[in-house]
Amino acid sequence: MTRMTRMTRSLSKPATTLSALFSKLVLAAAVAAVPLTTSADSIGEPGRDSGTPNPLNNVYFGEEHLHSSASPDAFAFGTRTDANDAYRYAKGEAIMETQSGKMIQKQTPYDFAAVTDHSEYLGMMPLLLDPNSPLRDTEIGKLIAEGTHESGEAAFQQIITSATINVPIPYLVDPKIMKTAWQKQIDAANKHYEPGKFTTLIAYEWSSQPNSKNLHHNVFFRDNVGPERPFSSFDSVRREDLWTYQEYQRSLGHENFSIPHNSNVSNSAMFALHTSDGNPIDKRWAERSARNTPAVEMIQIKGQSETHPALSPNDEFASFEDKFVHLLGSGGVQSLIDTSFVRQALTNGVGFQEMIGANPFKYGIVAGSDSHVSASVNEEFNYTGGHGNIDHSAEIRLSGAGSVAGEPAVLFGSAGITGVWAPENTREAIFDGIARKETFGTSGPMIKVRFFGGWNYRDNLVEDKKFVEKAYKGGVPMGSDLPEKPKRAKAPTFAVWAMKDPNSGNLDRVQIIKGWYDQRGYGFQKIYDVAWSDDREPGKNGKLPPVGNTVDISKATYSNSIGDTDLSVVWTDPDFDPSQHAVYYARVIEIPTPRWSTYDAAELGVAPPEEVPATIQERAWASPIWYTPAPELVEKLDFYPGLQKRLP
């Protein structure tokens, strides 16, 4: 029995929902065992089927972080598929997996994709196998030519070491060759761009890692030309210098932004409370950060960066795809968690807004894969690995034989994906949607989420056929600042709508997570369950009971007999203090479903690995909405203990 069949059979029971039509379609999909497609003209997404640009915006799903053979580490892992293959896979076409020779294919295609190969040694590695290239006879060229896991790992270690200490290998940084390689990336993006059908973004990754502190950012361009060359960590490891590059490219007409990723393993560097020089963050620095980096990557195959159980002890869902970080913390590279996670950064951001008048961490939320095999492996039931000869088969993934920098492949999760609300599927519209932060990230499923904030939303707004139109008119969407507080308003109201991925689990609950700074200069967070399935009631401790678990671990199956297909609510902050800067974002949680490693185990007829959970609750995170008090309401402090810590 194939993974696809196991997955689709889990949809055999129609779930309770406000939309009877959607339930029937889910049931029909289960019987037919084919991907589900629905009319998008629902309460949460009206106007998509008109065939013209939608002023109320459609949702488009895609990949913002993907590597091909043009990345040196991917090539060292044995990947030989290129950017063209990556775009073909994202569009739903089958491509060949390099190691096994098998064809791999997504069940549900993307609407957009960006190939973000490392700017360090970009495109140089394939030349190591070219018999007509002088690079073939170099030390690394000989290692690559051997084609074994051991030789690939040895080549990778030389490459990653040179990038880490910022000392380039001379024969791999020929400017002329690298310029040609970069143009190939641009040509591939433009070749596969089909406005209205499939969008590509010209992009690359700046892979700064000073002193084992991850500061990696992906850089994206709005036009179809791009810069003359990428900026690499060999140019500088300082993010301020990356911003200078971005600002210079903008002056040349190449509108761009950068997105930081893998803050969870940044060793406290990504959202540090000081600049690269160790100076306190000032208003100019914060404004440059906000202008150049409008979004942050919440999850990818190296784990989630939302929060950590030690930072959010009251969050029962904090320990999600975090084993990679835990292992790094107990051995290998030390991974410090303070100022390494997004929720803390968002909260510190509003503290900075009060303290210096600008927010350096005013991020929208996206998600990606960081896969290094030209394939974005976001489907748990269709997971084929993300590191080539390290994890290309179920046997290798579960055996512990495959590892990346010493970390077992089983610790890696499936890919996240980004949802962008935009009027149409074009390069400009997708870019602008991310730039204005009207985005959300998911851990893999194509959950749809809308999140609005205002001051006078009606309690039944989400049931209105003109919900979206009225929500825009009466407030702001995710990624925005709340309008100025009306004098008579007591607290902000938020409207949330979420719909499940038809090929994944039902929805367990919707939460709103709030961060704020109090009058003592410290940051706080609180989680509110605002909508949930199955007529549950919070207990005496205020906690909502678990939704249940239908997963048969031995068979890697589950039933959508619990949970709902869609959830919506209008919620008012019961703890609102008009004098406190605050940030709010929505999190949508699915019912438990099998992790990819459990699907692998069922396929092999073995017990699931003990290192990771057998089941997971997939999720989506909507970009935040911010509240800024009127200046006369704020009693600004002389010292903010939560933000003015001494350097370690």
Image (tube, helix red, strand yellow):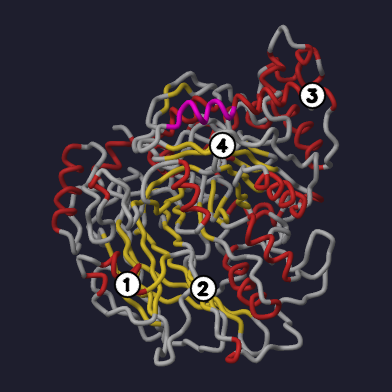
Q: Is residue 537 visible?
A: yes
Describe residue 610's horizontal placement relative to residue 139 as left or right.
Answer: left
Q: Amino acid at mark 2?
A: Trp
- Whether label 4 touches label 3, CB < 8 Å: no
Q: In this figure, which residue is indicated by the disc labeled 2?
A: 626
Looking at marks 1 and 4 on the same chain, the residue that comes earlier in the sequence is marked by 4
* Quadrant the N terminus occupies: top left
SS label for mark 1: strand
The residues tagged by marks 3 and 1 sit, at their Cα atoms, a distance apart of: 56 Å
User: Magenta region: which residues?
Assistant: 185-193
Q: Residues within 10 Å of mark 1 (few under 14, many from 20)?
A: some
Which numbered marker is on residue 433?
Answer: none
Looking at marks 3 and 1 on the same chain, the residue that comes earlier in the sequence is marked by 3
For residue 412, what is the image quadrant?
Answer: top right
In the image, what residue occupies the spot 30% across and 42% down? 7
The residues tagged by marks 1 and 4 sit, at their Cα atoms, a distance apart of: 39 Å
SS label for mark 4: strand
Q: In this figure, which residue is indicated by the disc labeled 3?
A: 174
Q: In this figure, which residue is indicated by the disc labeled 1?
A: 531
The residues tagged by marks 2 and 3 sit, at their Cα atoms, a distance apart of: 46 Å
- Whether label 2 touches label 3, CB < 8 Å: no
The residues tagged by marks 2 and 1 sit, at their Cα atoms, a distance apart of: 21 Å
Describe residue 396's horizontal placement relative to residue 555 as left or right.
Answer: right
In the image, what residue occupies the spot 84% across and 61% down? 277
